[in-house]
Amino acid sequence: MDFDKFNTLRKGLLEFLILGIVSSGRVYAADMMQRLSRTDFATQEGTLYPLLSKMRRDQLLDYEWQESETGPPRKYYKLTTSGRKQLAEFREYWESLTGLIDELGKPSCKK
Amino acid sequence: MQKVIQISLGGHTVMFQLEEDAYSALQSYLERARTRLKSDPDRDEVLRDLEQSIGDKLVSLLRSENRVINRREVDAVLEQVGTVDAGSAEAAGPNTRHERPRRLCRIQEGQWLAGVCQGLAAYSSISVEWVRTIFLATSVLTGGLPILVYIVLMFVLPIARTHDDYVAMQSSAT
């Protein structure tokens, strides 16, 4: 199997998976990595932080600081309105895409 | 004898004590991160997040022991944090588009023979007429050596159908 090709695909999808995770409520970066750790999308701070700051610049996410008992204050992320909109669009697009892939896989009626 | 260096990390109130080589490993990681993030408008913030994360991991490693951290431990933490991947942040940046395509291909659009000269022209941003002129002139002068090179390149180089395809191949390859 061509894993390199899948890597590119995964890299592009990560942003949407993060939108999905953040939509479940206020989360901080370590939560996200925990949620992804047992999946194909396991990621590290070195990848996640630049991506989160880019998503915030794109106004998909926002964060607020919250005191932590064990260390310095943490950033808790939540979706913005346009983040929620983009996630809904992505889910719809993804559904139509899987539909299309299934359909194209079937033998064509024309001869 | 090892020198011990005391540092603070991204918002942590505790001070960390590092052996000198552990300190330089951490420092060079952060410098590399800074370089990789050079086109990221939020560079300082991302660096601070990374520092804080490294601090979190060191705290859980120490479990409130007040001891000196060695190189091996720092390396393990940096391994967990991973190399800074500015790719996703850079994709939207203004700098990436202007880079010259780096891979040589042969381009079939407008080819005379196999498109090697077209490929060289696109690669070097020299007009294809010039490339062909130089190619023919050197072939005459050296008794055909470039022709041999042409034949080799014909088999070795990947093919782009049009110039647009070539540009698309370059941007997806990075």
Image (tube, coloured by chain):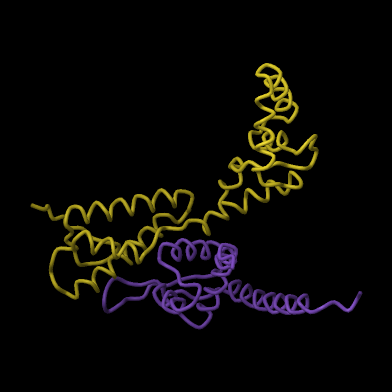
Chain colours: A purple, B yellow
User: Toward the viewer: B30 or A63?
Assistant: B30
User: Is residue A109 placed above or below B4 in the rendered structure?
Assistant: below
Name which residue lies at 56% across and 46% down. B95
Residue B83: give x, y in percent of width and height. 40, 58
Q: Quadrant of residue A96?
A: bottom right
Residue B79: give x, y in percent of width and height. 34, 63
User: Toward the viewer: A35 or A55?
Assistant: A35
Instruction: Judge left or right: residue A57 versus residue B7.
Output: right
User: Is residue B148 placed above or below A43 in the rendered structure?
Assistant: above
Q: How many marks?
A: 0
Q: Residue furthest top?
A: B141
Residue B160: give x, y in percent of width and height. 72, 47
Instruction: Judge left or right: residue B101 versus residue B36.
Output: right
Name which residue lies at 36% across and 64% down. B81
Instruction: Judge left or right: residue A29 versus residue B93.
Output: left
Q: Residue furthest bottom?
A: A24
Name which residue lies at 46% across and 72% down. A42
Name which residue lies at 52% across and 57% down. B89
User: Is residue A27 placed above or below B94 in the rendered structure?
Assistant: below
Instruction: Judge left or right: residue A13 versus residue B148.
Output: left
User: Toward the viewer: B44 or A93?
Assistant: A93
Q: Residue furthest right?
A: A111
Residue A50: give x, y in percent of width and height. 46, 61
